[in-house]
Amino acid sequence: MGSRASTLLREEEIEEIKKETGFSHSQITRLYSRFTSLDKGENGTLSREDFQRIPELAINPLGDRIINAFFPEGEDQVNFRGFMRTLAHFRPIEDNEKNKNAAPSEPLNSRTNKLLFAFRLYDLDRDDKISRDELLQVLRMMVGVNISDEQLGSIADRTIQEADTNGDNSISFNEFMKVLEKVDVEQKMSIRFLH
Amino acid sequence: MEDLWVAVLWGMKIWLYLIISLIMVPAMFGFSLGISETYMTILIKTLEWATLKLQKEKADEQTLKTSASNGLIQREDGSMEKELEELRRSRPKPPVGGDFTLSDCFYFSRKGIESIVEDEVTQRFSSEELVSWNLLTRTNNDFEYISLKLTLVYGLGIFVRYCILAPLRITLACIGLTWLVIGTSAVGFLPNSSVKYWLSEWVHVMCYRICARGLSAAIRYHNRENKPKKGGICVANHTTPIDIVILCNDGCYAMVGQVHGGLMGIVQRAMVRSCPHVWFERAEMKDRHLVTKRLKDHVNDKTKLPILIFPEGTCVNNTSVMMFKKGSFEIGATIYPVAIKYDPKFGDAFWNSSKYSMVSYLLRMMTSWALVCNVWYLPAMHQQEGEDAVQFANRVKSAIAHQGGLVDLQWDGGLKRAKVKETFREQQQKKYSNMVVGDESSNSD
């Protein structure tokens, strides 16, 4: 299994992924072997079922939304490149990356991109707005049957009121960023990847 | 042409005689000529040398080694309460009527992504990662070509393993199994008496010893004074069907299980003739009451051998112990916990049943270096007052995990094939709801 993992991943591919995601060489090869072990169909891509087979993810109230973040709209397979791109959102921001403003495009693990990941968990229909209805649905996923419709409704109303500045009764990404501007997104949306 | 046949036959004869005199006879009476010990010493030296060599070549890539043993990420182990508290610290004021912030999803996202990168369950069903290469092709992860010397030793290893050890081990395993069938059937004709029990035990142990040599098993038993006694239940962690051979090398057990067809069926039917094992038909297995009753009857008969049960119900890769099914702990018998830990350096003992069939697994084992393992007998345990079967099972599991140096997991090994139950997600939702609406709902449960 392990030997297959390192032979199937070409050196150029590793280089490209390294450039795009910022993961180190050994992180990439090890994540690749994780990828292949999740890939029960052995076709080089992961399906939603492959993710759902991880029990810890299956019991996560937002598990389905997180899985969804790996799949571009309308697709139901994700390859290793896409897998890594999504994971890269959770790389911690290193000191040397902070100062590098000259980067051609914003790194995947920037504060904005981390927030965008969270925003899209709520934005079910991908219209770049969180409506009251969407917020309610996501809240329902998180709390299950334990809170009444009425109470959840008032939570949703209040949350939207707090964030909504232009009065359209929904939360845009800008409003989302604004309302969370004091939160330590950099740390809370990061995983400590080892070498 | 004639001459050639004579030579071949003659060679075969010598081969058999050698096996019988050097391996079978010692195995029958349980002593050793020191051949396997010498082999093990040479093996350990070789592997040590290979490790040194690898370290020298890869001195600059030390990180690779350390990370292989530590995993890919470092998890934050804070509870949901603590982490959400931290997330909400930046909020201006906790409003009335439900405490929710948009950043609460950060916690779930991070947990979710962490479990995608690394999780406690699925990784227990694939082979353990090794710190250093043990000169077997199948475990060569990242070090492909290292040096000429190593490659030569590796080549020599292939020759020894496939051309010398494998045929020898296959012969031994065949002899062992045939003996088991013939021996136990023959003993089965004797009238019930102490001689029969004694003979039956001797035949069993002898056959298992021959089989163990067929796997070059080097087993160390610790705390023999705690060995399971008659009228009890021995529970152990489960890595492979070979666990049975390992444990039975040191004494006999009554097996519990389903009647199989084919070769296994023949062996099972022969075994039950000489000593009372508890075999169930497939349909009977589903009837929990019947199973419990037959186990109870067996345990209450103090002349019968201790029952051997693997309460995990599935093979785990020997890095952890997973949930113990409560069935064997409901009977009320004395429980004798046993911890089995294999040394992965000499060959991967874990049977990944979704990937390999029984036969190909056995062939892999027979072409590995050896099967080195430690067996610890733990002091007998009893169900305490006010403790239900599940709690008792967990206590026994922790004891085994602690002794064997294994990770103690709550997860059900059945997740290897089945999906996780919806109730576990509901528990998480409940926990989170309590944080949102505060005490209102926690009062009600």
Image (spheres, rainbow, N blue to C red):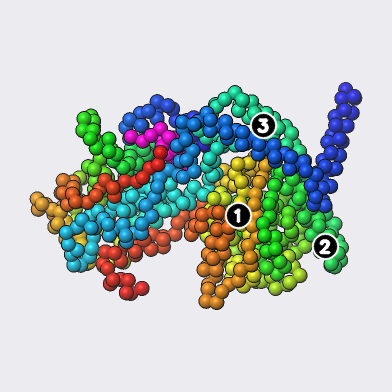
Q: Secondary structure at mark 2?
A: helix
Q: Nearer the viewer, residue B110 or B358?
A: B110
Q: Which residues are magenta?
A: A22-39
Instruction: Give how far across and how far down residue B26 sits, in percent.
Output: 82, 48
Label 1: few (<14), some or many (≥20) within 10 Å? many
Name the disc covering residue B198, or none: 2
Q: Which residue has dot 3 on it?
A: B157
Label pair 3/1, CB-CB below 8 angstroms: no
Instruction: Give how far across and how far down residue A151 sits, in percent.
Output: 22, 66
Q: Which residue has dot 1 on it?
A: B238
Q: Identify the mark nearer the N-term, 1 or 2.
A: 2
- The amino acid beneath tag 2 is Trp
Say above or below: B174 vs B414.
above
Instruction: Give how far across and how far down residue B373 sits, in percent.
Output: 65, 49
Instruction: Give how far across and how far down residue B190 sits, in percent.
Output: 87, 63
Q: Nearer the viewer, residue B321 or A79?
A: B321
Magenta stretch: includes residue A29: yes
Residue at left offset 50%, top offset 30%: B58
CA–CA distance between discs 1 and 2? 28 Å
Q: Quadrant of residue B421?
A: bottom left
Q: B392 left or right of A103?
A: right
Label 2: few (<14), some or many (≥20) within 10 Å? few
